[in-house]
Amino acid sequence: MPDNLYTEGMLREAFAEWKIEHLASHDSIIEERRCHSGISALIDMVARKPA
């Protein structure tokens, strides 16, 4: 369900106080056993918590 997916904007808002080093959305093929196999919408994020 698209309404349940995270977005880059949602993550930027949720981590507004953090320094976001990398944030990118992409589609990738995932192979996780028999139950989940195929294209998945993913977001990669690396952020640093403020001191």
Image: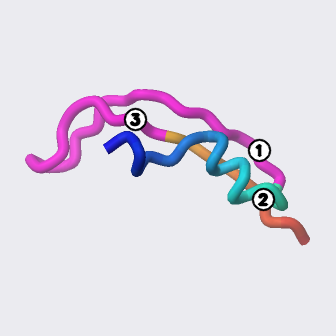
CA separation in Å, label 3 and label 2: 24 Å
> Mark 3 near mark 2, Cβ–Cβ under 8 Å?
no
Q: Mark 2 vs mark 1: which is more N-terminal?
A: 1
Amino acid, disc 1: Glu
Relative image position of residue 23 (x, y in whole percent) = 66, 39
- The region drawn magenta spans 19-42
Dot 2 surroundings within 10 Å: few (below 14), some, or many (20 or more)? few
Residue bearing mark 1: 21
- Give me the residue at 90% from left, 71% from top: 51
Q: Quadrant of the N terminus?
A: top left
* Outermost residue to the left: 34
Q: Name the mark on residue 41.
A: 3
Amino acid, disc 3: Ala
Relative image position of residue 39 (x, y in whole percent) = 28, 30
Q: Is residue 27 magenta?
A: yes
Amino acid, disc 2: Arg
> Mark 2 near mark 1, Cβ–Cβ under 8 Å?
yes
CA separation in Å, label 2 and label 1: 7 Å
Along the horizontal axis of the image, is 22 left or right of 34? Answer: right
